[in-house]
Image (cartoon, grey):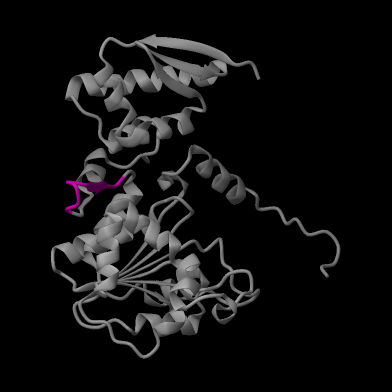
Amino acid sequence: MDIHEETIPIDNPDHVRTLFGPQDQFLRLIRDAVGAEIVFRGDELRIQGDADNIQHARAVIAELYEIIQKCGELLPADVHRVLGHESDGSPDAVADAAVDIFERAQQIKALSSGQAEYIRAIRENDLVFCAGPAGSGKTYLAVAMGLQWLRTERVRKIVLVRPAVEAGERLGYLPGDMMAKVNPYLRPLLDALSDMVTFEQVKRYMDNDVIEIVPMAFMRGRTLNETFIILDEGQNTTITQMKMFLTRMGTESKIVVTGDTTQSDLPMHTPSGLTDAVQRLSNIDGVATVRLTGQDIVRHRLVREIVKAYDDDTKPRRSGKQR
């Protein structure tokens, strides 16, 4: 592949800072989406890559610059929209779906119509199942909604739950105390929290039992009142575990169950508790099911392509007898 370089003259360095975003967050998104290297040197932007990627980068930068010049700012939703992360849903419906978490004036916004539907479902129902591929915002938006409900005092605490099903290992065989054992399993939930509030705030919440992280095995026998409960990786629960978990719900509580039904780590022929629960409970008033798709993926541009490649591959790959 031939590497080319083009430059874009810049007459206002402040516009470049706005384009790149806080800690260069927007720049990283743009680089990933267009597949080109972009740097600011002197009074120009330098774009390196193949010819098609450079052309794509120039078009994206031109559109973002137009927004900056017109509005004086650049929002994350603007960047995702220009990069093509939004689905074909109503722009107004998507724009109306936002989560205020009251941290550094931060607002988490839906970036697709599927995510907007998910946020509305959590607001309007006490039990929500959300199934979708990696990178579609299932866990992130659930954590954001939990923080909003906590900070507006609609719940007293947040409980984060995840089944510990990984590579055949059991918690008891892992080193360290209980927190050290479950940390690898609950890391995605903690990462989402840390992205929204400061590490010090997360630590205070956990020290004061306002945020609690619990492996599925430790949920039995509890009743959780006024609690926002999030079960992540719900596809890795059995039917019995899911029933046990759902019946922990107390008064004034809300449960969000997330999972990707295409990535179960359960033993072969073991039915998924998430799939079963969606089938059993979807017609009950106050229960909602949201299905996100590849159009809702907002991670690296390649994640959407990877998910699509696996979804499109429906041909069996077995040859001969299995051993």
Q: Is residue 176 visible?
A: yes
Viewed as shown, does residue 68 lie left or right of 176?
A: left
Horizontal and vertical percent position of residue 290 = 36, 60
Q: Between 312 and 19, which is closer to the camera in this rendering? A: 19
Question: Does 218 sit above or below residue 32?
Answer: below
234 inside magenta stretch: no
Horizontal and vertical percent position of residue 261 = 51, 64
Question: Does 263 sit above or below residue 241?
Answer: above
Give the main secondary structure, helix, strand or loop, of the magenta stretch. loop
Q: Residue furthest bottom?
A: 221
Q: Quadrant of residue 218?
A: bottom left
Q: Which residues are drawn in magenta?
A: 102-110
The residue at the point 56 percent across, 75 percent down is 175
Q: How many marks?
A: 0
Q: Quadrant of the N terminus?
A: top right
Viewed as shown, does residue 61 lie left or right of 171?
A: left
Q: Is residue 286 visible?
A: no
Viewed as shown, does residue 257 lie left or right of 241?
A: left
Horizontal and vertical percent position of residue 225 = 22, 81
Q: Between 125 and 99, which is closer to the camera in this rendering? A: 99
Q: Quadrant of the C terminus?
A: bottom right
Q: Between 168 and 132, which is closer to the camera in this rendering? A: 168
The residue at the point 47 percent across, 17 percent down is 47
